[in-house]
Amino acid sequence: MFLGLVRGSLVATRKVPDLEGAVLRVVQPVNHDGSHQGGLIVAVDTVASREGDLVYLVKGREATIPWPQPMAPIDAAIVGLVDGMDLR
């Protein structure tokens, strides 16, 4: 899992049938201190995030687990909203 900041949405008028109804978000991966970690990615939103939300994501095969179609072509998925962090 890793952290990201939702920067916006991606609209696709045509998708493979397994992704019908998917909400796609543009996410900036970030470190625990908020600094950028790599380039922007597109992720399937499974938790109704909004622009500006700090979220946690999964990549790879694990990204398809929360989606109803088990073999959907998903590389990254938002699986949680971060309410706060305590770094001691």
Image (cartoon, rainbow, N blue to C red):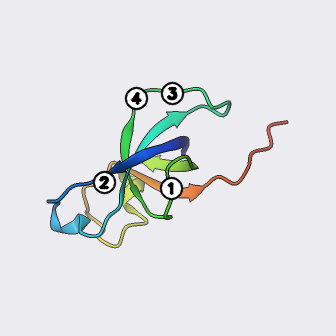
Q: Which element carries disc 3, helix, strand or loop?
A: loop
Which of disc 2 and disc 4 is earlier in sequence? 4
Q: Residue at (66%, 34%) from the top-left corner? A: 32
Q: Which residue was labeled with disc 3?
A: 37
Which of disc 2 and disc 3 is earlier in sequence? 3
Mark 3 or 2, which is nearer the eye? 3
Q: Which element carries disc 2, helix, strand or loop?
A: loop
The quadrant of the image that shows the C terminus is: top right
Mark 4 or 2, which is nearer the eye? 4
Q: Which residue was labeled with disc 4?
A: 39
Say what amino acid the circle numbered 2 marks.
Ile
Say what amino acid the circle numbered 3 marks.
Gln
User: At which x and y percent is residue 35?
Assistant: 59, 26
Dot 3 alpha-carbon crowd within 10 angstroms: few under 14, some 14 to 19, many 20 or more? few
Say what amino acid the circle numbered 1 marks.
Arg
Distance (Cα) linking label 1 and label 3 = 20 Å
Which of disc 4 and disc 1 is earlier in sequence? 4
Distance (Cα) linking label 4 and label 3 = 7 Å
Distance (Cα) linking label 2 and label 1 = 20 Å
Say what amino acid the circle numbered 4 marks.
Gly
| Between 21 and 68, the one nearer to me in the picture | 21
Q: Which residue was labeled with disc 2?
A: 74
On screen, residue 63 versus residue 57, left or right, reads left
Dot 4 alpha-carbon crowd within 10 angstroms: few under 14, some 14 to 19, many 20 or more? few
Residue 50 numbered mark, or none: 1
Distance (Cα) linking label 3 and label 2 = 21 Å
| Tag 1 and tag 3, C-beta contact below 8 Å | no
